Image (cartoon, rainbow, N blue to C red):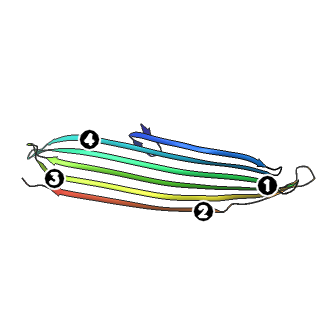
Amino acid sequence: WSNNNNRKTGVPATIKSGMYYSDKIGKKTKLNGDYTFNQNQVWAGSETNTQFFLPDTAYTNFKTVSNYSKNQSHNFNFRIIQKLDSLTELTLNPKVVLNKNETQSTQTDDFLTTENVKTRRTVITNDASSETTNANIYMKLSRNFLKKDRNVSVTYQPIYNSGTGNTKYNTDFLFYTY
């Protein structure tokens, strides 16, 4: 399986669910709302055994690579339309999106002699995580006039975006004597 957006390959696990609500309260108020949860996980790994034959030495490199990625999203949408009078309408439409992402990757290289004795090991780990919050509210006040095709609308949409991230990179070199 391949996810072209993140260029990751591996075994995926995806969960997506949500709900929708719609109602009319009285003659003047309409409500709509929805919530969506989405989670994608990908596990991938590989093993490679390479032998090197050089003029002065020969050795083997046994490499294992493992990757894990998890992306989680919560989406909230709500809309209320209120008729203030026969010619005036107020619309409020708040939206909130919460995202959480994490990745973990490990690469281990074992170097062995031709007698299959381990001489060196390198372990590289990279762990990253991030969280973002995006919120906005669309507000619109519309007023129609008695003359055909005449109206005025005022809109306002404040936006809030916030994000944090953390990355930890570690390399271990181990040398063995025999």
Q: Secondary structure at mark 2?
A: strand
1 versus 126 height, above or below:
above
- What residue is shown at x 20% (from left), y 44% (from top)? 62
Q: Residues within 10 Å of mark 3 (few under 14, many from 20)?
A: some
Name the residue furthest left. 178
Point out residue 106 in the picture as x, y percentages from the top left corner.
30, 51
Point out residue 66 in the picture as x, y percentages from the top left corner.
31, 46
Residues at marks 4 and 1, CA–CA distance in whole angstroms: 61 Å
Dot 3 or dot 4, earlier in sequence: 4
Residues at marks 2 and 3, CA–CA distance in whole angstroms: 50 Å
Point out residue 13 in the picture as x, y percentages from the top left corner.
44, 41
Dot 2 or dot 3, earlier in sequence: 3
- Residue 142 left/right relative to 13: right
Dot 2 or dot 4, earlier in sequence: 4
Res. 120 mark? 3
For label 2, the residue is: 160
Residues at marks 1 and 3, CA–CA distance in whole angstroms: 71 Å
- What residue is shown at x 42% (from left), y 57% (from top)? 129
Point out residue 40 in the picture as x, y percentages from the top left corner.
47, 45
For label 1, the residue is: 82
Dot 1 or dot 3, earlier in sequence: 1
Q: Residues within 10 Å of mark 1 (few under 14, many from 20)?
A: some
